Image (tube, rainbow, N blue to C red):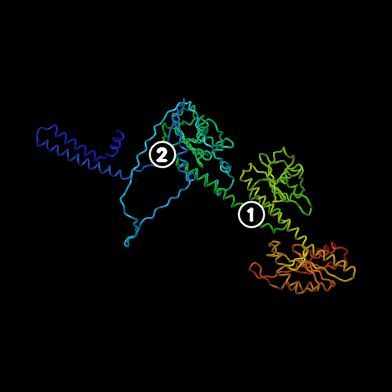
Amino acid sequence: MVEEVKRLLRLLTPIDWLAAGVVLVGLLIALVLDDAAVRLIGVSIALLGALAFFLLISQRLSEESLYSPTLRSQAEQLKTTIRQEPRSTRLIFDDFAETFASTDPTSAPPTASETPPLEEFVEDTSSVRIVGRRPRRSTPAPPAAPSAPTTSPAAEPPAARLRAVTLPEFVLTPSSAPPSEPRHAFHALLDRILTFVRAIVPSQTAALFWLDSERGLLVLECWQSEHPELFRSEQRTFPLGRDVVSQIVLDGRAEIVTELQPSAEVELLPYYRQSAGTSSFVGVPILLHARPVGVLCLDSPHAQAYTAMTVSLLGHVVLLISGLLQSYIQHYELFQQSRLWEYARSLWKLSTEPEETFPEQLLSLWAELLPAPVLVLCLYSQHQRQWRITALRAPHSWHHLRSVPCRLEQTLLGEALYSGHVQQWDGRSQPHRLHPQEPPALEAHTAYVIPLCSATHAYGALYCETPEPLLPKELELAETFGLWSGSLLEHRYWDELLRGGLWFQSTSGIWTQEGFRYRIAEELERAHLLGTDATLCALRLDRYGVLSTIALPRLRELLLTHVLPILRTHLRGCDVVGYLSEDTLGILLPGTELTQSHLWAEKVRKQIATTLFVFEQHRMSTTVSIGLTTLRQHRSREEVLRAVLTALEKAAQKGNTVIPYA
């Protein structure tokens, strides 16, 4: 009744008071004066004033009733338990998890219902389709009776705690990635949600915590406070205890604490250094798949600042947060997978990288995937039959170990290669990490050895020192990339063995390095036994201008597509063409003296220099340098190769010239 009177008084305006005054004047005339005619006039004045007052009030009441929103939070009826404690009063909402978990779309299976067919028709003069006409049948649902609060003694047995969901480690740990990374975007979004909550709910501090159930910790995600000097912002983790925040996230029940005494404030609210004058507190658990994973809490210096309506409103806020959390977890996993595939594409581009630059290029990819102050790459050398440090990105104290052989005995490297799994160094299992002369590990850093293994063999390992221990997701990512790196190394290993065992390339019609060396030895023995002449020519493209920047595979392609066709026009049937090295062609001319070979090489050189070809959409020409030597003046194949390469180097210094070995 009192609320209705207050509401009516708020609706009155000055003109309404004027109408009420007219009614009072009319009543005064009718009651005080003796003349009947005057009293009748007074009654008429009172009736007219009352009619005007009624018309004004009724119009204003109808205007106010046009929009009377019903908040969704008003419909939530939560079962509450009041617990009176010596230094505070706690209002516990027992069915909070059940109430708000039921509205989570991920916890309710989808239901399908068949819609009965309806007779329908469309009028020609209207764009509205009329489905059917039938009388409206609606049965209003009876209003639900609110449950009365029940008071229970303090010795009430604790409620059964809900089983917690373990959050991924990347949610609990801040990311060092750039701001475009999903972790930063998620944190910024949660911070804006806290700003929104503080705008609609009066509070001096709002904070959001995650539950780390494996370590028994509360992890602070974000906070906002009017007293930042009193907030423990430097302490990101809080051990679970008897404080009210821990009880909310463990029990999965929302709580309101009122009449909070200053002596109990620091004990019940762990995020304050000292008392901040808090009188009221509200906290609601954040649910994921109907299990508590965090808590959203607010406090206020005003007594009785929070009610059941506040808990219901915050319940819908945490529903939004749980949806964002689930979306972020999926987004993060997709982001990691996309990064891994990008690195995989870059990794397989290294399959044709020259042996001299391959280790540095591989280490560069690892440095992008796993930023660390110390990165050391150790690979197996097939030619030297040993494990060697082939590339490193580390402080100067590591540089003396470049190209140094590594030991597998009593080292973390050997343990990782034998097991095929990532190993973390603790200083107890193995005395050394890579080498007995290695520098000590950086202070407050964690050392790992990641094996580069295929499905059957180990081909290398990566040693790294990180400022923070790697997260499980990062370890899984590194192990997967190590497996792909091992597959690439295996591909290069078998490719090298295949090239070493293949003597003749049928596709290009020239001999490989091993096959051509065999033909040189064969022709050298024939020249000494039969006393015939034979000349060996070494031909290489002059690398200047655009050709100085192209990669070796592209240079070999240019030798095969431009130089070799011109060369074949000057060859006899008994002449032999093969590779002396990756970028050098060798031509064996049996039965040809050095003078004749010199003239022949000049013809080839001039024709190549005057022939145009298309390179990267440009018409251009190139030159070659040629070195010559006769076979009879040498006793072994190694002497022949050394002599012809010496002549070639002298010719390459001048450029576009032919020089015989003297």
Tag 2 and tag 1, C-beta contact below 8 Å:
no
Lateral position of residue 582 relative to residue 140, left or right: right
Please tell me whether residue 414 is drawn above or below residue 541 in the rendered image. Answer: above
Residue closer to the observer: 382 or 539: 382
> Which numbered disc covers residue 356?
none
Residue 640 in percent (x, y) is at: 84, 64
Please tell me whether residue 16 is drawn above or below residue 570 in the rendered image. Answer: above
Lateral position of residue 52 relative to residue 652, left or right: left
Residue closer to the observer: 581 or 344: 344
Residue position for label 1:
344
User: SS of the residue at dot 1?
Assistant: helix
Residue depicted at x 59% and y 36%: 215
Residue closer to the observer: 191 or 395: 191
Residue depicted at x 77% and y 60%: 500
Q: Quadrant of residue 152?
A: top left
> Which numbered disc covers residue 76?
2
